[in-house]
Amino acid sequence: MAKGFFISKAVAVAFVVAAAGAVATIIALSVVYAQEKSRNEPTAPVTAAPNTSTTVSTTTSGPKEPWQRYRLPDSLAPVSYNVTLWPRLKPNADGLFIYTGNSTVVFRCVKETDLIIIHSNKLNLTTFEDKHAKLNGLNGATAPALKTTWLETPTQYLVIQLKSRLQAGSSYELFTEFVGELSDDLGGFYRSEYEEDGVEKVVATTQMQPTDARKAFPCFDEPAMKAVFHMTLIHPQGTVALSNAMNHDPVNITVDGQDLIQTRFQPTEIMSTYLLAFIVCDFSYIRSDPAAKTLIRIWARRKATEEGQGDYALQKTGPILTFFEGYYNSSYPLDKSDQIALPDFSAGAMENWGLITYRETSLLYDPAVSSNGDKEWVATVISHELAHMWFGNLVTMRWWNDLWLNEGFATYVSYLGVNYTEPTWNMRDLIVMNEILGVMAVDALASSHPLSSKEEDVLRPEHINELFDSITYSKGAAVLRMLSEFITETVFSKGLHTYLEEFKYKNTVYTDLWKHLQMAVNDNSIKLPQPVEVIMNRWILQMGFPVVTINTQTGKITQKHFLLDPDSTVDRPSEFNYEWYVPITWINTGRIEKQHWLLEKEEVNKDIILGAGEWLVANINMTGFYRVNYDSENWDRLLAKLSSKHEDIPVINRAQIIDDAFNLARAKMVNTTLALRTTKFLHKDVEYMPWQTASHNLNYFFLMFDRSEVYGPMQAYLKKQVTPLFDYFKGLTLNWTRIPEKHTDQYNQVNAISLACRTGVEACNSLTTGWFKEWMENPDNNTISPNLKSTVYCSAIAAGGKKEWDFAWSMYKNATIATEANKLMYALSCTKEPWLLNRYLKYCLDPNEIRKQDASSTMVSIAKNPIGQPLAWDFIRANWGRIFNDYGGGSLSFGRLIDGVTKRFSTEFEYKQLLQFKEDNAEQLGSAATSLEQALERTKANINWVALNKEQVFEWFNNEASSPV
Ligand SMILES: *[C@@H]1O[C@H](CO)[C@@H](O)[C@H](O)[C@H]1NC(C)=O
Ligand SMILES: *[C@@H]1O[C@H](CO)[C@@H](O)[C@H](O)[C@H]1NC(C)=O
Ligand SMILES: *[C@@H]1O[C@H](CO)[C@@H](O)[C@H](O)[C@H]1NC(C)=O
Ligand SMILES: *[C@@H]1O[C@H](CO)[C@@H](O)[C@H](O)[C@H]1NC(C)=O
Ligand SMILES: [Zn+2]
């Protein structure tokens, strides 16, 4: 699956805004933090479900019966399935959408047994003489008679006890017939609804990963239980049926007097159940040139296809497939690649083999309304999913505990795939911004967890689901990138090739990959201090990462587990004592690259001892997953270098220096003023990465100080820093008439405008207000560049009053494109008029004005505004009962609401208010309870931080604001 699985839709939107705008990492992080934290709380021990059925003769080693265990026994192995499904796209008399179907699974008996256990969840199985299935022997084998059958709900099994044993080596077939609900729960076989030309339409589609194939039909639903699938779909006239494999010609059939179509599909390759997909819809498609080797089709709502929204995806899919064929040195394993955009979809996308499903925003791109960030997202998600066609689909992890390898790998190589097809975007650098810096903040918490889990620790579906987090995706990508860098990319891809060759159509554990990479390392005489596996174990079996301290006076290099909160305690032991094998690279004054493998806690390397006036910067291009601290002399020299000629330090490292310094300051390893000093050179830098990192990190300062006397000097300092950047973009865009050519310039233009307007650069405010005014005068012709919309709307509404607000509100009400509506919804929270903010808050609880799904994110946006903050807090307290009762049904995340509204809390007074709130609402906190505890904890930490830093920060900004550039 593509990332975006572990963040809900609203957060995903906020995240995209954050990536393009100037919202702090710390903010985005604490959302992730909240999730990570709750994820790591111990869960109650699993108690075996009471078993009411008769006991079996099969002996079991543990106290539990086989059907009470979450893993299938190893006595049976599926070979092939023959599945027919008939989804009804109209509700039945009870108002339910259902499907009917049947399945025959051929399986081989590997170990003699009198028990058949197969997954089945939420299906209504037909009984034949009281039994839920029929069994036949194949090739002369005799099928034992069924003794009893039942559904074991907790473990999601259909259990069949036999009167005699299945014989090892013999094959059998099991037939089931069932009715399932085509519900709108986004799992298994489900329905998605949308409106087109005033007509309500229904799509029947699937999302199996990780454990919902069993909800579509009875199956051996584990990734290692690979089989061949023969699918048949029955569907209404006027619709089309799609599945993993290519279809045969559809035929007309009549069932119960209804004229229908039956579409049969060619047998699939040998594959895992979680990669199955089948869809019935009336979408249209565009396709690749018939002469092309692989048929590529992009499916979407007819309107979207007509408008050309799939064109970009079609253009990019072919080249990305070509790239991966070269990278893996292995041809695309299938004969077609369908990709489809669905109106309702839970993840970002899903790599079903041959039929990839996407959320619309992850596949469709409309240059007239979408930003370059939207475009990058589409390219990245496509690349991620196509990478899985080999890594994940052709060769599959044996069990979910290795999910990090599957997802971390796809995340890493997705950047290579996009670089190939969009070489000017610098995607190889952007991985640092998009994945690595963010996950370092999560992994620096004492509550983090290792990448790799033990197979036996991941059994229940909810535990499997919890693995889809930022550690799995982003840290997985970061450590694989590090590995690929130190063994070189060529050797890395050679290892991948032999790995894919050996294990195609099979399953692996992560050590199989290490083995092949080691072979490639040996064949190419790459020198490593330890075998690949030994080095990598330290990165994947223990959580966190080191901070490496380099002393350029003594040559000493030391490492230590980096914790963002130095007072937190790590209660998770590590067999490696939180020490790593660290590949350290650096460049020095002469810009010569050097490297050192740090294998101990402390080592000395004379090469890092510097002469007078010399400097060095370590972790070139941030290829290593660690932070770097230096002796104060080198810090001073680095800062001097940044001030005199920042181009001598690679752009990624300019961002790294800022991010490391701010994080080291949070961890009390350097002074906060040192961190602030790393932003001084920015008035001369125009690159996106350093600016973006600084603005992320400074956002915490805004949160803590934008209601205090520090605010004035802080604004003055930042205004001074950003003015040259604003002027630079004015020149680059010929007085704002052009879109910058460079991808990262397009991003940084957004930073320039949003920071300049926010810190009161005159020209900025007149610019955005002017654009907005033009739009108001001509509402049908919005000429504001899609990249800039969010920030322009926000600053124009902040500078304006009722007229601007009401105009934006009416545009919001009329918006037909979700991304446009989201941008307006966010911008409406930027006004500085308290009465408008209060009215907007009221709208939040009126579903006719703001849809329920958007209520909490809107209240959170209002609270982000320093003027809206106290209003939102008062409003939520005053209306908590109503919020809790009306919005309790899952449409609103209380946790996110509490988290968002209390971000600024940093005084004893606010702490007491929070405590009071907790006391007053003890009975009705629901899912907010955890967030409330975290908010209390965070408020305490903020109080301490402010007490420790306020004075020096105030003084520093004061001095800087008044000193010349
Ligand atoms: C199936 O039925 C439709 C509509 O009734 C008709 O247009 C079509 O030609 C038929 N197809 C075949 C293969 O008979
Ligand atoms: C990015 O892709 C281009 C080709 O499209 C290639 O020449 C270049 O080497 C790639 N960059 C990296 C760093 O791999
Ligand atoms: C660091 O990244 C830049 C591009 O961003 C690249 O030109 C340079 O070669 C990289 N340096 C090393 C040592 O990989
Ligand atoms: C931009 O506008 C200013 C006046 O507002 C003008 O002096 C300047 O020549 C313009 N520059 C370009 C490149 O059009
Ligand atoms: Zn994925």
Image: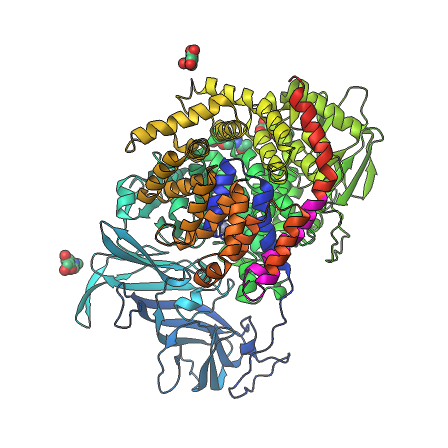
Q: Quadrant where the C terminus lies?
A: top right
Q: Residue at x 60, y 48 (%)?
A: 30
Position of residue 664 relative to residue 144, above or below, is above
- Residue 35 in view of the camera: yes
Q: Residue at x 48, y 48 (%)?
A: 859
Q: How is the image coloured?
A: rainbow
Q: Secondary structure of the magenta portion, mostly?
A: helix
Q: Which portion, as a residue range, is magenta?
A: 919-944
Q: Is residue 461 magenta?
A: no
**Residue 204 horizontal/vertical position (percent):** 32, 60
Q: Looking at the image, how many numbered discs can be counted on the residues?
A: 0
Residue 937 drawn above or below residue 810: below
Q: Nearer the viewer, residue 894 or 148?
A: 894
Q: Is residue 408 left or right of residue 627?
A: left
Q: Is residue 945 shown left or right of residue 106?
A: right
Question: Given the current orientation, which residue lies at the most extreme front position?
Answer: 835
Specify whether residue 926 is painted magenta.
Answer: yes
Residue 687's quadrant in the figure? top right
List x then y, in percent, for residue 203: 31, 57
Q: Residue at x 53, y 80 (%)?
A: 112
Residue 171, placed above or below residue 921: below
Residue 945 occupies quadrant: top right
| Visible residue check, residue 396 | no
The foreground one among 270 and 777 is 777
Please state the quadrant of the image where ligand 4 appears.
top left
Where residue 685 sits: x, y (%)?
59, 23
Residue 627 or 164: which is nearer the viewer?
627
Residue 147 image position (x, y, % from top left): 45, 88
Q: Nearer the viewer, residue 760 or 32?
A: 760
Judge left or right: residue 506 versus residue 853: right
Q: Residue at x 45, y 49 (%)?
A: 348
